[in-house]
Amino acid sequence: MSRVLIAGESWVVQSTHIKGVDSFTTSTYATGVEPLRRALEGRGHEVTHLPAHLVPAGFPGDADALSAYDVVILSDIGANSIQLAPEVFEQAAPGADRLGALRGWVRDGGGLLMVGGYLSFTGFEGKGAFRNTALHEALPVELLPEDDRVELPAGGHAEVTDAGHPALGGVAGAWPALLGYNRVRPRRGADVLATLGGDPLVAVTAHGKGRSAVFTSDCSPHWAPKPFCEEWDGYARVFGGLVEWLAR
């Protein structure tokens, strides 16, 4: 069993309803973490979810706090949310370099997985913003300086390039279609295990004593539709394999 922290995978939606000359707003809270949580808990892992709105105040700030986990997963949560703690952003007080601490924790033996989304890697309009952070050097891929999203509304299928690697969990056969991904470039020395549109979909590497991995599409809709994340038995194999490889 591994102890896994998933940061991100939640959002708040605010809608404006206009009825003639009158209008009002409603707000809803949603999460996309459940397919991934179920897959990992079904393989015996202990999962803690830190929703996106709690990340600025609650993300682990140093190696001691990170030591509560074997693997940290960042999924659809931008670098600003991790770096800009309330005391830093609201009070202009120095705080922890949490992405630097995360990089150091990986280098000293931790496991890191970044999952794709509009606020992962470089992200929508560059708002993921991980390229110019300390964490970039720990990833098995190099990030683009511009909006890196590739939308595949007609669907695209993964091409597995190293089916025998344990990080893929022994998954066999064709993968269901995905509807998009973040375009990245493989880093020298990294292993690309699967591609999508000719770009890395799954890549892994060693970083110091630790390991890091990326899955550049989503773990839930919209890029990962239900046939992929809810109906395919390979979903748990892939994400379980990644976590188990990262945790050794």
Image: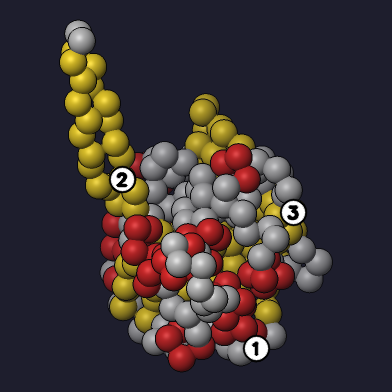
> Residue 209 bears which disc, if any?
1
Residue at image location 52% in from the left, 50% down from the top: 119
> Residue 12 bears which disc, if any?
2
In this view, the residue in front, 236 or 13, is 13
Q: Which amino acid is tagged 1? A: Lys
Most extreme residue toward the right is 188
* Residue 190 appears anywhere in the view: yes
Residue at image location 29% in from the left, 36% down from the top: 14
In this view, the residue in front, 117 or 247, is 117
Which quarter shows the N terminus? Answer: bottom left
Q: Which amino acid is tagged 3? A: Arg
Residue 24 location (% of width, % of height):
19, 26
What secondary structure is marked by label 1? loop
In this view, the residue in front, 237 or 198, is 198
State which mark lies toward you, 1 or 2.
2
Which image quadrant is residue 237 in?
Answer: bottom left
What secondary structure is marked by label 3? strand
Residue 59 location (% of width, % of height):
42, 72
Q: Is residue 30 above or below residue 186?
A: above
Separation of marks 2 and 3 at Cα, in angstroms:
31 Å
Residue 96 location (% of width, % of height):
53, 78
